[in-house]
Amino acid sequence: MGVPLIAAHLFCLYFGILADVTPPVALATFAAANIAKTPPMKAACAAFALAVAGFVVPFMFVYNPALLMRGSAFEIVTMTVLALIGIVALAAAVQGYFLSDLNILQRLFLLSVPILIIYPSAISKAIAVVIIVIIYFMQKSQLKIPAAI
């Protein structure tokens, strides 16, 4: 399929590990829920929300091998920064909070950022950066600045 061998192995490893914290297997989550005396499925859903970035990262390094230190220094640094931006956008979209509460449209746009970063095209990556910058400045302009005393 043209995927570097290390990317294929790490892809399988990531999803094998995620099975321990996400439903329906969620063995570690169910054990933790028992210790915490909380409903297991509620804990599993919370774990899924926290681990959602783990589902995106394997696709990032399959389609962008620079994340596995394969490529020039510029490619590696660029993809690392873009991956970080994508994960922050995904986390903000899932949690519903960036600099302040997000509306549904902002959440949908932030959900598109990691997908655009995964796609191996410079244009899609540029669109992803533009989306995150626009939402950042929208959120920044809505913040209340406390008055000087």
Image: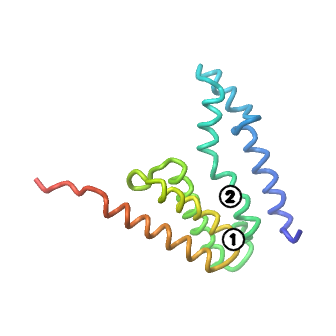
User: Dots 2 and 1: beta carbons under 8 Å?
Assistant: no
Q: Nearer the viewer, residue 36 or 128?
A: 128
Task: State whether residue 117 is above or below residue 98.
Answer: below
Which label sits in the foreground, 2 or 1?
1
Task: Say which residue appears at 67% left-offset and 67% top-offset.
Answer: 118
For image coordinates 79% across by 45% down, the residue present is 16
- Left or right of 64: which side holds 146? left
4 sits to left or right of 33: right
Quarter holding the N terminus is bottom right
Q: Is residue 14 left or right of residue 83?
A: right
The colour scheme used to paint the residues is rainbow
Q: What secondary structure is found at the residue carrying circle 1?
A: loop
Residue picked out by circle 1: 119
* Residue 22, image quadrant: top right
What x and y, as percent, mark residue 37?
59, 19
Residue drawn at point x = 61 percent, y = 31 percent = 43
Query: Image height check: is 125 above or below 89?
Result: below
Q: For residue 49, which numbered disc appears in the image?
A: none
Q: Tag 2's secondary structure? A: helix
Q: Please state the horizontal and vertical placement of residue 120, each as a whole percent of the image.
A: 70, 74
Q: Which amino acid type corresponds to the residue marked 2 in the rendered image?
A: Val
Front residue of this view, candidates 131 and 103: 103
Residue beneath disc 2? 57
